Amino acid sequence: MNGSTSRRHGYRRSIQTRQRIWRRLRYIRTAGIGLLLAGMVVAFALVLAAQSNAPAAGPRPGIAQGGPQWVTLTSTSPAAIQTAARQTQDFQDVLNSPQTLLGQALHHGTLGTPVLVHLYRPAPGMTDVWVIPVLETTAPGAHIVALLDFAYDARYHRIHALTFAGPFVPTDPEYGQPFPRIAPAQASALLVRTHGLKLAMGGQPELVYFSANLDAIVGPHATVKWTGGGQFPDLAIWRLPAADGHDYLAGIDSRVYTATQLPFAPAAGA
């Protein structure tokens, strides 16, 4: 996503404390967002950025002092996840900031069906993520104008806000795109066409993201050209467990990769 003008909201929580470079590089995707915010919202962003440097909450119920604000789920039904998402402080902060474009998008839009994105090859401090599309219903044929990411603690049935991407405009790569970018049937068909392989017996496509080497793939000094996606939950890709016993990944660029081709962060791909 090098050079993307997509607007990624500044209210965020750390997925993994040691990955400070992740947080810095995500701002590259939304260069200029600060120019759109009023002074009050900038102050909010500065406070929350300071909070993101605090240690992440441990694997126990409740809210750690200075850590992420978890909201308990009553179930994993779409309605329950949407309700919990609206209860997070970050969602309310944005919703109550009508001077921002994202605040306007949340106020006038509607939340779509939450989609669970799994972490591929789990890494310490990182979680599965619920991605919730925001739909603009005033235009013909409701389309996605933002994507909201919420960390999911399956053990304690709770979520907290991670990042909000949007609102998307015609110059953004995300504008007019569905989520996920390609359908599971299309991903399976790509596996057959490119590798002559079918899914393993009982295997199903699974949406994933991975711990990426953002130093290498993002920014003006990137050393690896990566168009497959998967480095963020809202750029989820399909894991395809194939009949040959190996995983293949169908990227947002409609290419199929082996696991060894993914630009993992150091030690994350082991």
Image (spheres, helix red, strand yellow):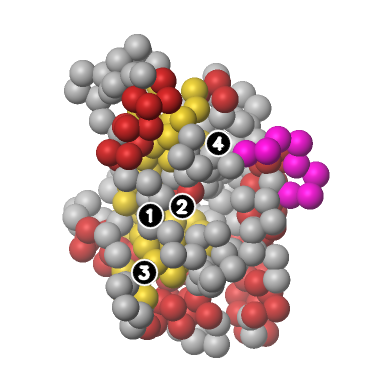
Choose between 146 and 96: the one closer to the eye. 146
**Residue at the limit of the structure toward the bottom, as seen here:** 99
Q: What secondary structure do most residues of the magenta stretch adopt?
A: loop
Residue where numbered disc 2 is placed:
234
Residues in magenta?
219-226
Mark closer to the chain start, 3 or 2: 3
Q: Report the amino acid beneath label 3.
A: His
Question: Based on the displayed image, in which of its 4 quarters is residue 73 positioned?
Answer: bottom left
Going 31% across and 69% down the picture, which residue do you hit? 111
Residue where numbered disc 3 is placed:
143
- Residue 146 is labelled as none
SS at mark 3 in the image: strand
SS at mark 1 in the image: loop
Going 25% across and 25% down the picture, which residue do you hit? 203
Residue where numbered disc 4 is placed:
211
Compared with 241, 215 (above or below) is: below
Q: CA distance from mark 3 to mark 2?
A: 15 Å
Mark closer to the chain start, 4 or 1: 1
The reply to whether dot 2 and dot 1 touch (C-beta < 8 Å) is: yes
Question: Based on the displayed image, in which of its 4 quarters is residue 43 positioned?
Answer: bottom right
Q: Report the amino acid beneath label 1.
A: Phe
